[in-house]
Image (cartoon, grey):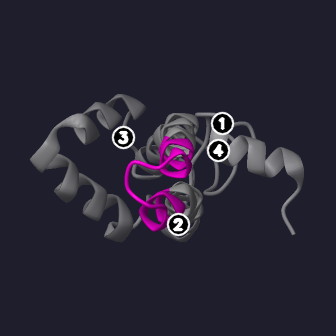
Amino acid sequence: MPEKSDLFWLFFKTSGRVSRAAYFLGQLLLAVIQLFPLYHFKLAPEGSPESEVWLSIFVVVVLATAWPTIVLNVKRLHDLGKSGLFVLVLFVPLVQLVAILLLYVYPGQPGPNLYGRQTNGPANS
């Protein structure tokens, strides 16, 4: 079981590297968190107060998970030996599909690199 500080590092700190598996699982967790209010919004009758509440919750959740999503992408880029600034490519609509696919399938650099000694840890570990 990961420690609380490990989860804080994974989702909120940009230092270090993450492997493909940790990246996938982190993105999956964020997607499930985002899909929960969206699912309830879709179940609520259209135009009802309940649907308005679920839509508002969905918007808040998406905004709240934006930073953790960016952080995971930066750390995955670090594992590939690339600067976190390449995360800006993920904001270009058609390019983002290819870039995200590459983040999921391309293996990270073995051994230490500029962004950390090992995968799945902060830069100073």
**Disc 4 secondary structure class:** helix
Q: Residue at x 76, y 50 (%)?
A: 7
| Residue type, numbered disc 3 | Lys
How far apart marks 4 and 1 lie (CA) works out to 4 Å
Q: Secondary structure at mark 3?
A: loop
Q: Is residue 46 magenta?
A: yes
Name which residue type carries label 1: Phe
Name the spot of residue 66 as percent of width and height, x first: 49, 37
Which residue range is magenta in the image?
A: 38-55
Give the numbered dot on residue 12: 1
Counting residues from the N terminus, which is met first, the one under dot 4 or under dot 3?
Answer: 4
Residue located beneath label 4 in the image = 11
Near mark 3 (Cα within 10 A), the count class, few <14, some 14-19 or many ≥20, is some
Q: Is residue 116 left or right of residue 96?
A: right
In the rendered view, tell whether residue 4 sits above or below residue 43: above
In the rendered structure, find residue 28 and report the number of the disc placed on it: 2
The residue positioned 61% from the left and 42% from the top of the image is 16
CA–CA distance in space, label 4 to label 2: 12 Å
Q: Amino acid at mark 4?
A: Phe
Residues at marks 2 and 3 touching, judged by CB atoms closer than 8 Å: no
The residue that disc 3 covers is 82
